[in-house]
Amino acid sequence: MLGALPWVYTPKMSYCEIFQDGVGGNSPVNLSRYAKSALERRRILEKYRRIAMVGLSSNPFRPSHFAAVYLLSEGYDVTPVNPRETEVLGRRCYPTLLDVPDPIEVVDIFRESSAVPEIVEQASVKQAKVIWMQLGVIHEEAARRACDAGMDVVMDRCMKIEHARFFGGLNTIGLNTGVVSSLPRPRRMHR
């Protein structure tokens, strides 16, 4: 395992040990059969644009809200799914995935791990293409059922962080504002 740095490649290392990377690099998911490489995660982010965000909150201080604002700013179509909300970010919010009238490509889960099996069942009925479980959300059995239903599974990763990593949106506030740069600040003239 790659817990300590520096690490050295050995011929007996697994694919997951070699390609552990980025946020969640120490996650047990990286050593499971459901691990997705950086290339696979990037492919998902490039290919699918319609996201049902389960657990999206209207509270701007919640991680789900922050992720949704970012994904919307990057051109994704985000549909809120939360039985406690009626509207989030100016979009109608649905109580369950089964209530969403439009096709769903990615189900982004901001719920506790124990809620994942039911969400996977609903995603299967809606013929979703991807189950994406946020940081800290891991459910191996639900992942197996999703894979058996033909869905890609990403566990213990943040869609917003992964997108920002691959497409240049990492900076202080998490949005690609162009304000944060590696260039030195321009000098002010003192009078």
Image (cartoon, helix red, strand yellow):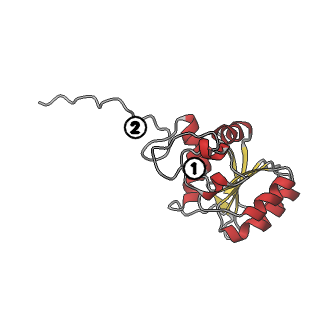
Q: Amino acid at mark 1?
A: Val
Residue 48: x, y in percent? 74, 41
Which residue: 66% across, 45% down? 14
Query: How busy is the neighbourhood of tag 2: few (under 14 within 10 Å), some, or many (20 plus)?
Result: few
Residue 154: x, y in percent? 69, 51
Q: Is residue 58 left or right of residue 43?
A: left
Q: Amino acid at mark 2?
A: Val
- How far apart are labels 1 and 2 at the CA level? 18 Å
Asked if residue 19 shows in the view, the reply is: no
Q: Is residue 7 left or right of residue 182?
A: right
Q: Which mark is residue 78?
A: none
Residue toward you, 111 or 99:
111
Asked if residue 145 is positioned above or below residue 103 in the image, the reply reads: below
Q: Secondary structure at mark 1?
A: helix
Q: Secondary structure at mark 2?
A: loop
Q: Is residue 122 left or right of residue 179?
A: right
Query: How busy is the neighbourhood of tag 1: few (under 14 within 10 Å), some, or many (20 plus)?
Result: some
Which residue: 88% across, 58% down? 125
Residue toward you, 187 or 17:
17
Asked if residue 122 is positioned above or below residue 30 in the image, the reply reads: below
- Image quadrant in which you'd find residue 89: bottom right
Q: Number of callouts in the render?
A: 2
**Quadrant location, the C terminus:** top left
State the residue position of label 2: 180
State the residue position of label 1: 69
